Amino acid sequence: MDGLLASLPAVRVAVIGDFCLDAYWTIDPDRKPQSVETGLAVKCVRAQAYSLGGAGNVVANLAGLGVGRVRAVGLTGDDLFGDQIRELLARLGADDSALLRAGEGWQTSVYLKPYENGVEDHRLDLGSFNAITETDERRLIEALARTVAQVDVVIVNQQLIQGFCTPSIVREINRLISEYPKVTFIVDSRDYAGDFERAVLKLNAREAAKLLGVEAVGDHVPSDQACDFALRLSTRTGKPVFITCGEDGIIAASRRDVKQIPGILVYGETDPVGAGDTTVAMLATALGAGHSSLTAAVLANIAASITVRKIGTTGTASPDEIRAVGSRPDYVFLPELADDARHARYAEGSDIELVRDLPTGLNIRHAIYDHDGTLSVLREGWELVMQPMMVRAILGQQYDTVDTAKFHRVENAVRDFIDKTTGVQTLVQMQGLVDMVRRFGCVPEDRILDEHGYKRIYNDELMKIVRQRIDRLGRGELDATDFQLKNARQLLEALHARGIKLYLASGTDEPDVIAEAQAMGYADLFEGRIFGAVGDVKVEAKKMVLERIIREHHLGGSELATFGDGPIEIRETRKRGGVCVGVASDEIRRFGVNMTKRRRLIRAGADLIVPDYSQLPSLLTLLNVPC
């Protein structure tokens, strides 16, 4: 990763396109004087902010990646908004000498976005009636020709129907593609992608279908069909083709070869605005640095996953942010299978779903277990405690008075966050809660708790339920098996008897995990190898256990198996090549499949999905453990 990122600053990139300006005007709702002239209410702008849009945002992304030499080629009006674009480009260190001031009648393209009470009002668009003159067309062609001779990559970024992209300019770009075969041309065009010859194309699936004349494409294009589109277009152009698939990742095709890079899991709320600009900027830079189309797609996928985390802004991705995600991010696997159980395969005579073929010759020597929902249901219903607690924390004193729409927006955000973070330390979840409290802005800053404060509130509520259940065990009113998944202890005993070392790893506080395992009667089978949260968000129990086991025992992937009902343990094991048994448990019945868990476990990378351990002989046979 460091080597790849270090190669980017030396690339020379030109961006020709529709340079736009995003204008954000914040209206003060409490100040509405009347106009003396008209008698109408005046909307007073308390704050204003401007950012680059269109091709300008592509330049911003290139600068964010550390590309040292970026040239802007295009047109603006001879107006104050054009001057603002130039000022923003200058701050980025971009060369705007080929960004021309058009003649009379051409307005800079601006999206004016008034905001009142945090809600965007009707947008005002400038430049919607532009028509390029022959003189400006000729000037732009000459500027582009001069620029191409000095760069490694040209990005063609077309967004406006009435913008720079005329038939004459398309013909000139095609001529330059032929004249400069060592320069990479990559086209990101909403309307004219099919007019460019022998250029690298960046498209979405619907745009690809349109180029191929495929009709009746729905909102979702299956991945195999999108791969086919990419391969056909790459064969036609003789150049790489990239098809972006939103949260499902990106497809890279290069003539006869096609690869799909999975989407990357993003916790919390996302904002896709600007992700396409990030993608094309990284694709162009990586290709210009001499990397393969597959490498370019992997990097672009990571960069876009960073941009979508930046809410309410057309963000960029920096090399440091890309390094932080790492070369093995949290990929989302097989989303179509996860969302449609009709395609499921099962081991013969069982309810065990075969998501991925297991490697032959498995020799499992170590098995890691998550606790809650995988073995124990003592904490069943924890989500029903956490969700209302988080909603109340976010809304604060507005809880009883907030409008229904906002209440449901908060509820949905909390539900999605809990779904994505199931299995991580509670303290990490509470860190996410702090971020959500700030983002929704209902609680004054001086009343926002830190993650430890919110954890105390949640833990106090949950432990009331857990202690009641443990007390009933102690009084003999219930048996430990009443709080275990079907055959959970039998599975532990079977593996332990065959010399397989067992580990318990939980996001729950470590003393509580130990106490609950003892109450359930199977703590001795782990022989002291029970790990939980220690009050430090930097120490993730599951990751720590996995890394320790592999390091200390010099394990290959097939020697390690992990059983879990949360995506964290499955994802971390998948990264390390171990066998992932997803436990899609129904914690109320303690047997049978929970389809919500099935979906999240497949997306996390599970090899097998089991609802419980009732079909123990079949499971042991699949894992190559002698019965």
Image (tube, helix red, strand yellow):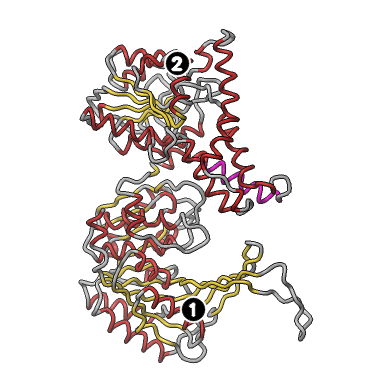
Compared across the picture, whether 42 is left or right of 428 comes to right
How packed mark 2 is, by other alpha carbons closer than 10 Å (few <14, some 14-19, many 20 or more), is: few
- Please tell me which residue is depicted at 38% across the width and 68% down the height of the picture: 193
Q: Earlier in the sequence, mark 1 or mark 2?
A: 1
Viewer-side residue, 596 vs 411: 411
Is residue 142 a member of the stretch shown in magenta?
Answer: no
Residue that sits furthest to the top in the current view: 476
Compared with residue 541, is residue 87 higher up or lower down, i.e. above or below?
Answer: below
Compared across the picture, whether 119 is left or right of 140 comes to right
Is residue 410 a member of the stretch shown in magenta?
Answer: yes
Q: Which mark is in front, 1 or 2? A: 2
Magenta range is: 403-417
Locate residue 571: give its quadrant. top left
- Answer whether labels 1 and 2 touch (C-beta < 8 Å): no
Image quarter (top left, top right, bottom left or bottom right) of the C terminus: top left
Specify the amino acid type for callout 2. Gln
- Please tell me which residue is depicted at 49% across the width and 75% down the height of the picture: 21
Viewer-side residue, 102 vs 515: 515
Q: Main secondary structure of the magenta part?
A: helix
- Measuring from the top left, give residue 331's x and y in whole percent: 37, 44
- Measuring from the top left, give residue 377's x and y in whole percent: 51, 22
**Secondary structure category for the residue under label 1:** loop
- Please tell me which residue is depicted at 47% across the width and 15% down the height of the picture: 520
Task: Tell me the residue that label 1 is attached to.
Answer: 162
- Measuring from the top left, give residue 128's x and y in whole percent: 54, 78
What label does residue 562 carry, if any? Answer: none
Locate residue 233: give its quadrant. bottom left
Task: Tell me the residue that label 2 is attached to.
Answer: 518
